[in-house]
């Protein structure tokens, strides 16, 4: 077991990112490889249909709604601007994609799948 602080690099190319609020010490993980990033956000959001258009909407599941709201409001603009890949729970299938800035809030843009070629 390896203990780490929020914001530490856990192992090479895997960085803990503080996204507190859902639970004490809640963090997400930013994975970097070949110039791209994947942000695994855990429970940063609970309902994409409500909280992407309006990130300030709180969920009763959050231990500290004020901190959870602040985490979303801090992270969403960065993730959208950088077109960061996102993986997380509470997102429509396949749970992998990007968020896009809209006039009001954000929208979910899932990765597109193509048939495998053999």
Image: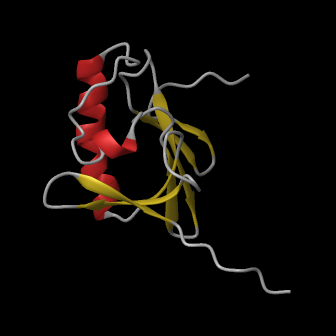
- Vertical arrangement, residue 46 with respect to residue 106, above or below: above
Q: Residue furthest front?
A: 49
Point 31% across, 59% down: residue = 80
Closer-to-camera residue (76/89) = 89
Q: Quadrant of the C terminus?
A: bottom right
Closer-to-camera residue (84/45) = 45
- Left or right placement of residue 87 versus residue 81 in this view: right
Query: Where's residue 62, x and y in %?
Result: 37, 19
- Left or right placement of residue 83 versus residue 66 in this view: right
- Left or right placement of residue 3 versus residue 66 in this view: right
Point 76% across, 80% down: residue = 116
Q: Residue furthest right?
A: 118
Check the image and tell me how it is coloured. secondary structure
- Vertical arrangement, residue 71 with respect to residue 34, above or below: above
Q: Residue furthest left?
A: 103
Query: Where's residue 27, x and y in %?
Result: 47, 30
Q: Residue furthest bottom?
A: 118
Point 34% across, 55% down: residue = 79
Point 68% across, 24% down: residue = 2
Closer-to-camera residue (32/97) = 97
- Left or right placement of residue 5 versus residue 81 in this view: right
Query: Where's residue 104, x and y in %?
Result: 14, 54
Question: What count of labels does the image hold?
Answer: 0
Q: Quadrant of the N terminus?
A: top right
- Which quadrant of the view contains residue 103? bottom left
């Amino acid at each position: 077991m390896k203990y780490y602080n929020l914001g530490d690099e856990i192992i090479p190319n895997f960085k803990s990112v503080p996204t507190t609020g859902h639970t004490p010490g809640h963090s997400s993980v930013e994975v970097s490889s070949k110039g791209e990033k994947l942000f695994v956000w855990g429970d940063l959001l609970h309902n994409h249909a409500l909280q992407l258009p309006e990130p300030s909407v709180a969920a009763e599941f959050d231990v500290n709604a004020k901190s959870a709201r602040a985490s979303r409001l801090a992270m969403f603009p960065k993730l959208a601007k950088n077109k960061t890949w996102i993986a997380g729970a509470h997102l429509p299938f396949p749970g992998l994609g990007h968020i896009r800035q809209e006039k009001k809030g954000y929208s979910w843009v899932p990765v597109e799948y193509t048939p495998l070629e053999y």
